Image (tube, grey):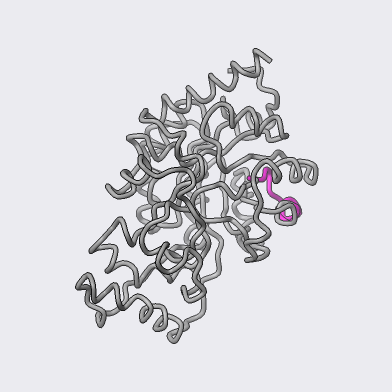
Amino acid sequence: MSTWPDNRILDLLDIDVPIIQAPMAGATTTAMVIAAQQAGALGSMPAAALSIEQLREALTIIRQASTRPLNLNFFCHQPPDADDARDRRWKDLLQPYYLELGADFDAPTPASNRAPFNEAACQVVEEFRPEVVSFHFGLPEKSLLERVKATGAKVLSSATTVEEALWLQEKGCDAIIAMGIEAGGHRGLFLSDDLNSQIGLMALVPQIVDAVRVPVIAAGGIGDARGIVAAMALGASAVQIGTVYLFTPEASVTASHHHALRHAQASETALTNLFTGRPARGIVNRVMRELGAINPAAPAFPKAGGALMPLKAKDEAAFSNLWAGQALRLGKNCSTYDLTRELAEQALARFTRN
C-alpha cells in the first residue's frame, strides 16, 4: 500500500501500513502478533506478564514464523516498598466477598506481579534483537536504555500529556505514542498520578504533534478506518489499535471477558485501580460498582490484584479485570489478518478519495 499522507512511521519501522497492533498483556498471543506482521502492520508482543523463559519461547515462535519487524513491549514501573498494613486493610475491605463466595480468607494472599524492564529483560532484547522496543510508564534507567538502542531497536513509549511527550523526546524516543483517555488497559502516565491531567485523543494528538519533532502514534478509541483518518488528520503518523483486536480468534480472553466485550455498551467502561493498583480502563463489573472504580485503599501497583484472585476463581465476571477501550462497540468477529487489512484498505481509500 502507498499514498499515505505521512510515511514517517512506515519508513522508521519498516512496515507497510501505519498500524501498530497494541501489546495487550494477557490477551496478545504469538498468533496475533504473527498475523499482524503478515498483514503489514507492526506486531507487538507484551512482556510484562511473562517470565523470561515464557518470553524467550514466544519470541522463538514469532521469529520462526515471520521475518517482519517486531515490537517487544515492557513496563517501566518501580516495584513498591512492602506495606503490610495497607495490604491487610485492602484484604479486610474484601472480606465480605470472601464470606459470601466461600473463599478462604485466612489463606496466604497470592502474589500479583508485573515484571518491570530489568537486566534479564535487557539480555533478551540483546539476544533476539527486536526491531522495535516499546515501554509503558516512562523509560528504563539510562544504562539499560542505551543497551536497547545499541541493538539497533527503535524505541517507543506512551505519553498521556504534552509534558510526558517532551520528556520522552528528550530521553531519546524515536516516536511517541499519544495515549488518549479512551484507551483500554493501563494508563501510561508516569510524570504524575493525577487523573485530572488525562485528556481525550482529539485534544491530545495535535498538542503533542505541535510540541515534538519525532513522529506521533495515536492510541485510544480507534477501531475503524474513520478513526485512522481522523488521527492522521490531527497530525499522527500512525495509529496503535488494541480493543478491536480482542474480538479476533487469535486473542486470548476468558469466557467472561469475551461475553462482556460483545454485550457491554461503550459507556460501560471506566478507569479503575482495583485490579492492579494503577488506573486502567475496563468494562464495569460488580466489584467496580460496589467499591468504586477508583478506591484509595487499593495497594500500589502491581499488588492490588493478589487479594482479588481467590474471588476471581469463584466469580470471574464480577472480580476480574475486563480491559477494554471506549471503541469496543466497533469490534467485529474476524481474524487479525483480515481486520488489519480491512482497516488499512478502507482508511487508504478514504485518503485517496479525498
Q: Residue at x 42, y 55 (%)?
A: 284
Give whichever of 191, 66 is nearer the camera. Answer: 191
* 11 in magenta: no
Camera sees residue 162: yes
- Magenta segment: 166-177
Give whichever of 188, 315 is nearer the camera. Answer: 315
32 sits to left or right of 217:
left
- Which quadrant of the figure contains the C terminus? top right
Camera sees residue 29: no
User: Where residue 191 appears, x then y in whole percent?
Assistant: 68, 63
16 sits to left or right of 170:
left
User: Where residue 145 appears, x then y in whole percent?
Assistant: 63, 56
- Which quadrant of the figure contains the N terminus? top right
Task: Give above or below for 45 relative to 163.
Answer: above
Q: Residue at x 59, y 52 (%)?
A: 148
Q: Quadrant of residue 84?
A: bottom left
Q: Quadrant of residue 222?
A: top right
> Extreme top residue here?
353
> Extreme left residue here?
102
User: Where residue 7 appears, x then y in whole percent?
Assistant: 68, 27
* 174 in magenta: yes
Q: Residue at x 67, y 45 (%)?
A: 176
Q: Residue at x 45, y 53 (%)?
A: 282
283 sits to left or right of 159:
left
Q: Quadrant of residue 35?
A: top left
Give whichever of 162, 23 is nearer the camera. Answer: 162
Task: Give above or below for 164 relative to 306.
Answer: above
User: Where residue 144 appears, x then y in whole percent?
Assistant: 60, 60
| Callout count | 0
Task: Give above or below for 340 relative to 324.
Answer: above
115 sits to left or right of 165:
left
